[in-house]
Image (cartoon, coloured by chain):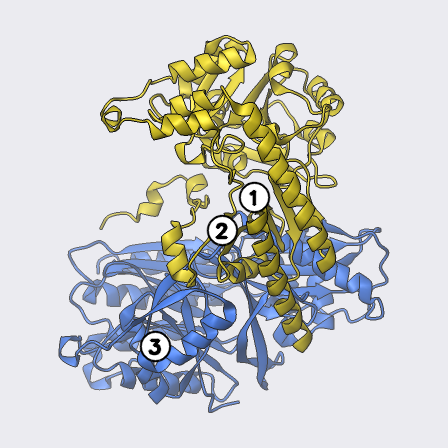
Chain colours: A yellow, B blue
Amino acid sequence: MPLPIAELVPEYIRAFEPYTPSRPDPELMRQFGVDHLHRLNNNENALGPPPLACKVIREFEAQRSAVYPSGDSFFLRKALAERFGKEPDRFLVGNGSCEVIASVIKAFCEKGDNIVTADKTFAVYEWVAEFSGFAARLIPLKNYAYDPDGMLAAMDAHTKILFVCNPNNPTGTWWDRDTMERFLRGVDGRAIVVVDEAYREYVEDERFPDGMELMERHKNVVVFRTFSKMYALAGLRVGYVCGQQEAIDYIRRTHIVYSVNALGQPAAAAALLDDAGHIAATRRMVAAAKALLLPAFDALGLRHVAGEGNFVMVETPVSDSLVYRQLMRRGVMVRTMTGFRFPNWIRVSLVQEPVMREFVAAFGAVVAAARAEDAAL
Amino acid sequence: MNFLPVAAAAAENAARAFGLESAEALRLGLAVEEYFAYLCRFAGREEPLRLTLSRGGTFVRAGFRFRAGAVSLRALNFAARIDIEDEGAGELGLIVASRTTDRSSLELSGADVYQLSAEVDRKYPLGEPIAAAQRLTPPLRVEDAPGPGLLQHCALLAAGRYAPRLCPRSFRRPGRFVDMAASGQYRALAVLDAADRPAGLFCWRASGRRGVAFSGPYVFCDPAEAALAAETARLLTERFLSLVARSEVVCAFSERPTPDLPRGWFERLGTLAMPDLAEDGAGSLAPQPAYVRHLREDVGGAVWASPDLTDFLRREYDRLAFSRDLLPAAPAPQATLPEHSLLATTLDRVRGLVVLRPLLDGRDFADNLAAHVTALYEAVEGAPLAILLHLDLAQPWQAALSPALAANGFAPRLVLPHGGTSDILVCQHAAAHS
């Protein structure tokens, strides 16, 4: 009799929960009986990509699909190097930033090592560490923000990487330059510090630290950025890591080649060429959406957290998973926050005004119904 | 069969080594002997029979993994009848084995592969519940990993403040509760006040592959301190959800929800009639609300439904806002079914609770179910008993059993979303003994 498959699997994999992506829109619409679906769950940029990236996508020739892409995103790294004034070899491009997270952890961690990050942040740092067999030390947020002192106190001789999501997803809180500098001095080069700047293009405050500049003074800093958020290329999956040459050389040894497709590479490179107008328009859209949503939440008497980034969090009077299902029946998809360890909160992506108004109406109706049901009990 | 004495001796010795006293060790040895003998004779002979002896913290378990082969499994039904004239069938041994354990259960572990578990509990002394209200001083804080002393104290505080039906029985034997927590049978959280005095307790255990069943929250402050009590309950509930949120758990179900459960955190599934027993086993059935907390974003799904269940399921899914396609489940033609059905029975005599799960369909299903009901009420000798039957709606043949359930006095009570392979329909027998 063959062994149960489970007995062939390491314990840390058995304990790990696979991520279940949402189903495609047509299937969700059929399931929930709606004729439209506004995706406010993944912080996508509803304006779409910048114009030159759109042009590249439109003109992509089908025959090019028959040819492997550049294995190391040669031209895209060159474009990034020109943009940031660094050598192309200091960039590694991946199939979204999730892939580069895995590359960094594989490069620096070995048995017995740990990583340090926050308890309520982007889950992939914790997930990749744990399914790779490394401990994730999770430091509680303070006032919805990363706690630098708590993270430093959690370090030990086996801490190899500290992940700082700046601004933090899902709270939008961020460390200013002084906080970041103080933290990096505290780390004192004892471990790699990953500064994940997935949402940095949304930040206008001059006190926000620039990871690309930090890494020149702190050799242990590596920076993640993505084309999935501000640049609206989430469907093409392009993210990258940049750091000092030596650190990147080690990460390259664990990094998968040929993982970034032939359309994503030139579209991302083109997006860098004309992004000023696109970024400004996106920031205006986000600001307008916040101006609409936050007073609406106040009017409902609900707490909310709105920092930097194209999203806000709001507390729900009933289970967030129930609110999710009720909103789906009204054609609106949000992200439940229980999985981020914020039970009874949802996160809402900030998009154009008509959709935001539809969300406000649907959310208000769901909240009212929940309160009426509670009052009836 | 040559290994029978080895298996029985191994079970008895392992039981002693794992902390059982002699009488309990003998019980496990006897059960293993009977099960082993039966399975050697009747299970699929071309495959090995695997026996695992393990310590479960508060019990010792003998687990048999075997392939059924072509042999009928009807004798593994709890209600299997004993034919005294046909002693060679070995069914008497099975009955003896199941009666000598504290719990026996049978689960499908793959195609035609079964896992038979027999468990015998360790003995623990009774503790004295603490009824005095606690004077507490804020601020409160959550203790994620309460130590044995704190757990014992919290268990006795809860036992002193809450009705027995709202407390795991182990609260009255706090050493058992501590061992259950240490071995992972339960996980527990405590809330402490500014002087590290216990203010509250919350505990939960695994329920199926992707669920947890929770008990609590238990709040220990002076009843006049409503705000402090609410804060304690909120801290416990929020921390519990945060801890299970990034695990394999999809749903949290209430097992013993207390009136202190904060509103707005869980969805009400329905009501079950559950035994409200005193320490001596006396008592009656009392209504107990059931709550669920879904921890993920539900993407909808399809379940099988017998026509007589359609209205109930549509109403429940609509009320809970779960999107489900109902697929019509029709019973298989009698001629295509094996003669005998098989029901997995989990009987917890201490709680007065039975959960039945259909494992194999058969032409005798309705009769077999009726025999189970009779045998179960007989087994508890008139004590209050809740008989639940779980149908996994991912299985069309299980969904199609609904008319047979209704004919035997079972009625649908609630749906557990993601409680099994798919959703679980919980039916309860209209108790003759209450």
Disc 1 designates what residue?
Answer: A351
Number of marks present in the image shown: 3
**Same chain for the residues at labels 1 and 2, yes or no?**
yes
Mark 2 vs mark 3: in front? 2
**Same chain for the residues at labels 3 and 1, yes or no?**
no
Where is residue A43, by image quadrant?
top right
| For residue A168, side relative to residue B327 (left or right) | right
The amino acid marked with disc number 2 is: His
Can the viewer see residue A27 in this picture?
Answer: yes
The amino acid marked with disc number 1 is: Val
Q: Residues within 10 Å of mark 3 (few under 14, many from 20)?
A: many
Q: Could you tell me if the residues under marks 1 and 2 are in contact, i.e. CB atoms within 8 Å? A: yes
Subunit bearing disc 2: A
What residue lies at 43% left-to-right and 49% top-to-bottom? A22
Numbered disc 3: secondary structure: loop
- In the foreground, B382 or B289: B289
Quote the CA–CA distance across marks 2 and 3. Answer: 52 Å
Q: Residues within 10 Å of mark 2 (few under 14, many from 20)?
A: some
Quote the CA–CA distance across marks 1 and 2. Answer: 10 Å
Disc 3 designates what residue?
Answer: B78
Disc 2 designates what residue?
Answer: A38
Numbered disc 2: secondary structure: strand
Quote the CA–CA distance across marks 3 and 1. Answer: 60 Å
